[in-house]
């Protein structure tokens, strides 16, 4: 597998920076009470962090709202995953359990207020690409079968078959979703300037450690930016011990 970011994304948006975790041989079965405790603590911390602060004005949310508006998605109607999760918590709800991989990346997302997502590598076909949509690629939302293709010019994650995630990090597709049976996965932690890149690095490394702790397997960490925007899954990288 190759993970590539199209040149146009760097041309049109302010310093995209993506932490990438490639994990193989994980055990994603069952729930974990420690992960649930981490989520509850992070939810409580988030509520304190947003006291007197509008979600739309948080420094980690502002650049994503601007990016969405730039590619034609109204921020009030379509929200990056970090904003959507934050609003769920601020409404007094808990982040629901999905599976261990999704639960730990949701924890990291609300702890750092960064979009985080993941795909099952075994369900993907061809390369993973972050690029503009043509508008003709097939896409089915989580839990849905009907085709809901993206609009032309929408920023999307896609492979050779179709769309994996619409509106950059708004909504995952059903075909490559992480399930309890997932054994090989790619996870991404995303940021745009002026979000400090070292925050994204810290969040990515912590997520890698949690995946290793709770799911086992092998874990590799990479970082993609305008100087390094192609990733081969077999390339050497830092293994999390």
Image (cartoon, rainbow, N blue to C red):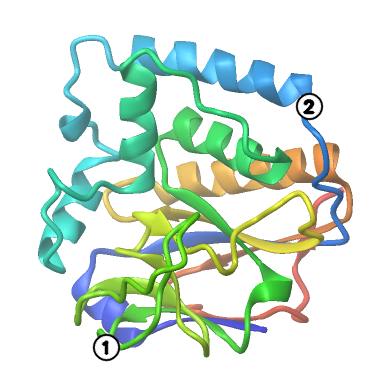
Secondary structure beneath dot 2 equals loop
1 with respect to 172 (left or right): right
CA separation in Å, label 1 and label 2: 41 Å
In depth, the one of 229 and 106 nearer the eye is 106
Marker disc for residue 134: 1
Which residue is identified by label 2? 32
Name the spot of residue 2 as percent of width and height, x first: 62, 84
**Rendered view: 71 above or below 112:** below
Residue 24 location (% of width, % of height): 82, 63
Q: Is residue 198 above or below residue 221?
A: above
**Depth check, front residue: 152 or 206:** 152
- Residue found 24% across the figure and 36% down from its top: 59
Dot 1 alpha-carbon crowd within 10 angstroms: few under 14, some 14 to 19, many 20 or more: some
Farthest-out residue, front: 146
Q: Residue at x 72, y 39 (%)?
A: 100
Query: In percent of the image, x 46 and y 13: which residue is there?
Result: 45
Q: Quadrant of the N terminus?
A: bottom right
Q: Quadrant of residue 231?
A: bottom right
- Count up the numbered dots: 2
- Which residue sits at x=34%, y=63%? 168
In-front residue for pair 145/80: 145
Which label number is shown at residue 93?
Answer: none
Q: Is residue 72 left or right of residue 9?
A: left
Circle 1 sits in a helix, a strand or a loop, which is it? loop
Residue 166 location in percent, x, y?
A: 35, 65
**Coordinates of residue 207 in the picture (x, y in percent):** 65, 43
Q: Residues within 10 Å of mark 2 (few under 14, many from 20)?
A: few
Marked residue nearer the N-terminal end (1 or 2): 2
Q: Quadrant of residue 214?
A: top right
């Amino acid at each position: 597998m190759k993970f590539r970011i199209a040149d146009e994304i760097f041309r049109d948006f302010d310093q995209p920076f993506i932490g990438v975790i490639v994990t193989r041989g994980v055990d994603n079965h069952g729930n974990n009470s420690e992960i649930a405790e981490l989520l509850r603590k992070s939810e409580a911390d988030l509520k304190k962090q947003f006291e007197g602060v509008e979600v739309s004005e948080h420094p980690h949310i502002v650049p994503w709202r601007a990016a969405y508006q730039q590619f034609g998605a109204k921020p009030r109607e379509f929200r990056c995953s970090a904003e959507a999760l934050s609003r769920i918590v601020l409404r007094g709800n808990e982040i629901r359990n999905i599976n261990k991989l999704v639960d730990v990346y949701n924890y990291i997302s609300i702890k750092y207020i960064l979009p985080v997502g993941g795909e099952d590598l075994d369900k993907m076909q061809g390369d993973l690409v972050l690029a503009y949509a043509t508008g003709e690629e097939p896409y089915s939302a989580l839990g849905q079968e009907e085709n809901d293709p993206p609009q032309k010019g929408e920023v999307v994650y896609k492979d050779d078959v179709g769309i994996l995630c619409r509106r950059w990090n708004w909504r995952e597709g059903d075909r490559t979703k992480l399930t309890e049976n997932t054994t090989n996965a790619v996870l991404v932690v995303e940021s745009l300037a002026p979000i400090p890149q070292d925050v994204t690095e810290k969040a990515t490394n912590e997520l890698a450690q949690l995946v290793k702790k709770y799911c086992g397997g092998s874990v590799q960490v990479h970082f993609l930016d305008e100087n390094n925007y192609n990733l081969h899954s077999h390339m050497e990288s830092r293994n999390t011990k």
